[in-house]
Amino acid sequence: MPGRLLIVDDEKDMLALLRRMIAEERDFEIEVENDPRRALARFREKPADLVLTDLKMPGMDGIALLEAVKSLRPDTAVIVLTAYATIETAVEATRKGAFDYITKPFRRDRLLLTVDKAMHWQQMVRENLELRKALEVKEGFASLVGASPVMRRIFERIRQVAPTMGTVLITGPSGTGKELVARALHRHSLRSAKPMITVNCTAIPSEVLESELFGHVKGAFTGAWKEKRGLVEEAHEGTLFLDEIGDLSPHLQTKLLRLLQEGEYKPVGSNVTRKADLRFIAATNHDLKAAIREKRFREDLFYRLNVIHFELPPLRERKEDIELLSRHFLAKYAAVNRKPVSDITPEALAVLQAYDFPGNVRELENLIERGVIFSRGPRLTVADLQMEGSATSPAEADAAEPAGLPFREAKERAIRHFHRRYIRRLLEEQGGNISRAAEAAGIQRQYLHRLIKEAGIEPTEFKTR
Ligand SMILES: Nc1ncnc2c1ncn2[C@@H]1O[C@H](COP(=O)(O)OP(=O)(O)OP(=O)(O)O)[C@@H](O)[C@H]1O
Ligand SMILES: [Mg+2]
């Protein structure tokens, strides 16, 4: 079924040009209108699947039209046309629910690409609407917990932003929940029936990552004995989550920029350009602005990613969340470990609230998990948390030899203690440089990353300047 397209621009020449460019190549039902108010009246009578509108028009600007269209029919795709000078407004339009924007002057293929993507999105929305409603009711924000004003605002914005195509950048220190926010965004998006594929940009060397991402053709390099699909292809019509984006090599930054801008990429060793329909979410715990200054991160890529920004504050700056999170993890690990512990003493809570959590929520989660495992009664106590005498570092608290514990638990505890001490010392020696630390320890970088996370250690703490 051909889609319905409504084009709105106060300049008649521009209207004619747009209509011609699209009509020559596509089989849409096209209507044009040079007065935004009349356009809206017409839309009310006979809604379009896609509205292509200029931004600066007398009487009613493109943003107002966008808002009106979206309130009448949220699933209509809107593309905004703009001169370069008003790019800020265009970004604002994306935030307000525009599907995308096109800067003038534009190329025909660019225009068609965006129009096609928007039409496609619109169809997908239709198909997914019912499914999405069912999911939303079932899951809500089940796993993302928070009661502080910051977190409430984050929940609200997730709801607003999730159904749009806007690219999202999530920043914040390690363990603050960036990945969970990405998942919530995907789950509340119109793409939730398709997968969210996560790419960890840190753990893998650049060449390997390139073929992971884009796939490769047979014979692309030694060992490429058959063709391989890339993650970009697997994420088609879904979400691509680029974790630790700050670690992406310059070479891949360039390729990613192309993917973001044109929706195009080439598998390694191939000359054939492929198209991908993706929603992008990126996360990092690095300061990208600093990376840009130091020429380690492309500024143009940053702006493409940073259309919608979520900043997750460290846990110590939202202590209101500690109680809720503690209870959430308590319930989780009591169930997992089949322990009859269902509450936490006020003293234990006070100890947690006084602590500053360099490892953020992940560290709190680890603490509660450990506490639950060692708990003896129906309430989690200060003793269970094993934080005594170490207001700054519970990491050292389990140094004491665990007396009277079953062998397996005692052993696990000793191993954990060893991991923490070893890694802290290693990072200290290597000034927080993970590559060097992994090499010195003779283990894989990826494995070291996991150990660091499990131990709730913040590697940047060890950075020497
Ligand atoms: N608001 C929250 N509610 C419930 N669990 C949370 C919340 N925030 C974080 N967590 C939990 O804390 C752990 C760390 O979260 P997550 O992996 O999302 O952090 P991150 O910011 O991506 O960290 P990193 O930068 O180290 O990758 C996870 O187990 C996650 O489930
Ligand atoms: Mg993460």
Image (cartoon, rainbow, N blue to C red):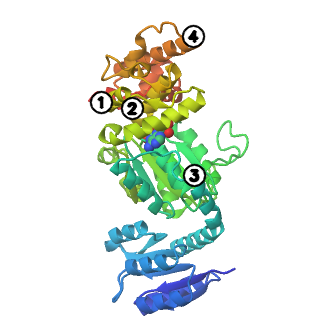
Seen at 34% across and 22% down, the residue is: 393
First in sequence: mark 2 vs mark 4: 2
Q: Is residue 325 visible?
A: yes
What kind of residue is marked 4?
A: Pro
From the viewer's perspective, is residue 312 above or below residue 340?
below
Within the image, what quadrant is residue 94 found in?
bottom left
Residue at the extreme front of the image, as rendered? 378
* Of callouts 1 and 3, the N-terminal one: 3
Tag 2: amino acid:
Gly
Q: Say what secondary structure mark 1 lies in.
A: helix
The x and y percentages for residue 5 are 56, 83
Which residue was labeled with disc 1? 354
Q: Earlier in the sequence, mark 2 or mark 1?
A: 1
| Rendered-image quadrant of the C terminus | top left
Q: Earlier in the sequence, mark 3 or mark 2?
A: 3
The residue carrying mark 3 is 139
Tell me which label, 4 or 1, sits earlier in the chain. 1
On the image, the x and y values in percent for residue 216 come to 65, 47
Distance between mark 3 and mark 2 Cα atoms: 27 Å
Q: As rendered, which of 154 and 24 lies closer to the eye?
A: 154
Counting the numbered discs, the total is: 4
Mark 2 residue element: loop
Q: Specify the amino acid type for callout 1.
A: Ala
Residue 422: name its quadrant: top left
- Circle 4 residue: 406
Q: Report which residue position mark 2 lands on.
A: 359
